[in-house]
Image (spheres, helix red, strand yellow):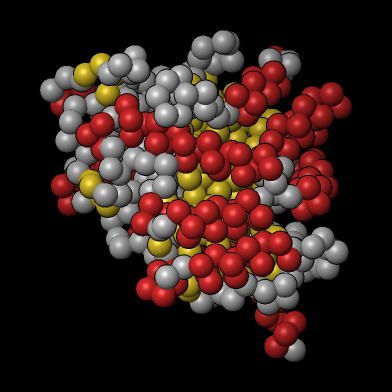
Amino acid sequence: MTTSISSTEAGGSAETGSGFRVRPKGFYPFIDGHLHPELLGPVAAYELTAAERNYLDPYIGVTADGTPQQGLYTLAETGIPVSMAEEAARTYLATLRPHFRTVSSHPMDSPNWRRWTNAFTSWVPKGVQLARLSEKERDAALALIEASLSPEGYRTVRDAMRLNGALGEIVDDYAETLTEFTYWMTIFGEPSTDAPWGWQLMGHHLDLNFVFVGTQVVLAPVFVGAEPSFSEQGTYAGTRLFEWETGRALALRRTFTDAQADKAVLFPSILNADLPEELSGPFNGRHLAGAGQDNRVIPYEGVNASELSGAQQDQLLELVELYVRRLPEGHARLKMEQVQRHLDDTHVAWMGGHDDVSAFYYRIHSPVLLVEYDSHPGIFLDYDEPMRDHIHTIVREPNGNDYGKSLLAQHYALRHS
């Protein structure tokens, strides 16, 4: 069962100077980044609290049939330096005032890794909110994120944060909640060049889980979204996201033969009336692997990459690389090599049109990587059908390596032996 949003039922909407129409004031029961689910309808409350319900479940990982495929992730020495991130993490912790440092650090094996949401928390979040930090402390937090990611990855993160701030300028009723720095930063473990540790950034439309195991790194799960996906005026004018993720996907889809499209296209439209109810909800849309879905069973669907031409496979890998190259160059190269080894087991599924305006969804599902991209209806902005102005993306490492768990298990088994 899904929940629909109707501005007519809610009492109409208002147009802002930005040109966007927004939902009525007080439409959602949250303040200062905190959601009050008891004030929502039961379906909406259920969808938006999945992480809180599920984070203590025994971890399995996203799988195609309920059983993780073994031997996909191997503990290894990459020879790629990770000391810059470790040093940045130590500097960040040293910069924090004592009371912030206390709440910022959690054990590496904390179940709170899995307690994240791309919406708003219905619990007291772990970590410390960047908006509560001094400029010096916040700069140190941003320096840690920058030291861990590639330049492209860091730019994506900062643009998602800025677009959240842009949304707050448009929807002034939530200006204190939708800000550039309403994100919680948590350090797990003790920053080190040999012992496992990691960090998490969590907030609206942006969730990063970054794990270091020796010289190996895992960036998963990742959620990056934006509503709207561009800002044309105000403080954040000129900020845009997802142009390449949109354009390259469309370019690939437009090369499909009729036979390939017959397998790849699950639904030719993602308008609400054209989809089954479970795929037309306003909060999760077509997404399967979002917050609280660490153990989701997602069967392979779509066209197998082995059925694509060599040129099409190259286009597919170029699309995947947009998500993978958020990692530093050396680590991104290793991940792409891993993806290529499993290319014949990779599937591409599509929903929606592929013209210049239609909203669409795609999923790239490999044994070692899961990517979802979805066009959503408005949540704060007033439109009830999916549009390209509101995009959600998710990246996971299926078969048990989200949060680096497969590599961590191997590390601890080796140390124990």
Q: Is residue 410 left or right of residue 5?
A: right
Q: Quadrant of residue 277?
A: top left
Left/right placement of residue 70 relative to residue 374 reads right
Q: Residue furthest top?
A: 356
Quarter placement of the C terminus? bottom right
Q: Which residue is at 30% across, 61% downward?
A: 123
Q: Residue at x 26, y 38 (%)?
A: 174
Q: Residue at x 45, y 54 (%)?
A: 135
Residue 340 falls left or right of residue 292: right
Camera-side residue: 198 or 50? 198
Of residues 223 and 4, the one nearer the viewer is 223
Residue 381 drawn at (x, y percent):
32, 25
In screen coordinates, is 410 left or right of 18? right
Position of residue 283 measured from the top left corner of the image (x, y, whole percent)? 36, 37
In terms of image quadrants, where is residue 385?
Answer: top left
Q: Residue furthest left?
A: 11
Depth check, front residue: 133 or 146? 133
Tell me where residue 16 appears, x and y as whole percent: 28, 18
**Image height check: is 134 above or below 101?**
above
* Residue most extreme to the bottom: 417
Task: Say above or below: 314 vs 208.
Answer: above
What x and y, as percent, mark residue 54? 40, 61
Q: What is the quadrant of the N terminus in the image?
A: top left
Residue 223 in view:
yes
Residue at screen point 73% across, 50% down: 328
